[in-house]
Amino acid sequence: MRTKSLALLTAVLLGAVIAPPASAAPLDLHEHWDQRCSSCHGHSADFSRRSLTVENGVLAGRHHRGDELARFLRNHYLADELVEPVMRMLAAQVAQPPTFRERCARCHDTAAEFARRSLESRDGVLVGRSSGKPVGDYLATHGRLGAAEIGPMVDTLTRVRREVATAP
């Protein structure tokens, strides 16, 4: 019995040494939100616009601000290494108008799904995965966005593409 226990302990310890930590791989923040948070809070952008504010560059909730909000998130089912990235994602969504949802979602689902499926960064430029065409150039003739909306949409999609880092 002792030999089995020792063998099991050795296998577990060896597995911990050989297997990379779960946080080593980039995380898709939107998928994480969808799997862990959306059942109570809904879509992250809707939640952000409805429940959060950014005051003097600091994300704030109804009852928590700044470090207090970060501490709350750590105690509210969010791993330490995800607190800052999720807070940045939510703060960006607070400030972002729902242009993608209003103009693009009918055909392209969510911005996160669209970014996973159809976008990639090449030499620092966001491009369509299949066309290779810069998204800003494409939007000039697609989606009926005004000229002033194209830059912010490219910025939004670039940010979302970074946030879905595990996408191919």
Image: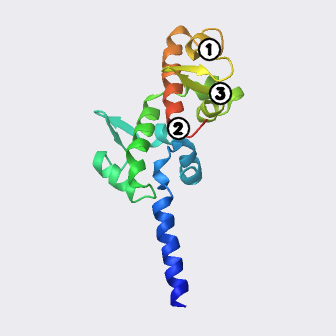
Q: Horizontal and vertical percent for residue 152?
A: 48, 19
The quadrant of the image that shows the N terminus is bottom right
| Secondary-structure class at tag 2 | loop
Tag count: 3
| Relative horizontal placement of residue 88, taking residue 153 as reference (left or right) | left
**Marks 2 and 1, Cα distance to the nearest angstrom?**
20 Å
67, above or below 154, in the image: below
Q: CA distance from mark 3 to mark 1?
A: 11 Å
- Across and down, in percent, residue 134 comes to 58, 15
Judged from the image, the secondary structure of the residue bearing numbered disc 1 is loop
Q: Residue at x 41, y 42 (%)?
A: 85
Q: Amino acid at mark 2?
A: Ala
Q: Which residue is mark 2?
A: 165
Q: Amino acid at mark 3?
A: Ser
Q: Which mark is residue 118?
A: 3
Image quadrant where one finds the C terminus:
top right
Q: Residue visible at 52% across and 84% down?
A: 5
Q: In the image, what residue type sits under mark 1?
A: Lys
Q: Which mark is residue 50?
A: none
Are discs 2 and 3 less than 8 Å apart at CB?
no
Residue 126, placed above or below residue 25: above
Q: Earlier in the sequence, mark 2 or mark 1?
A: 1
Q: Which residue is mark 1?
A: 133
Give how far across and how far down residue 133 sits, in percent.
Answer: 62, 14
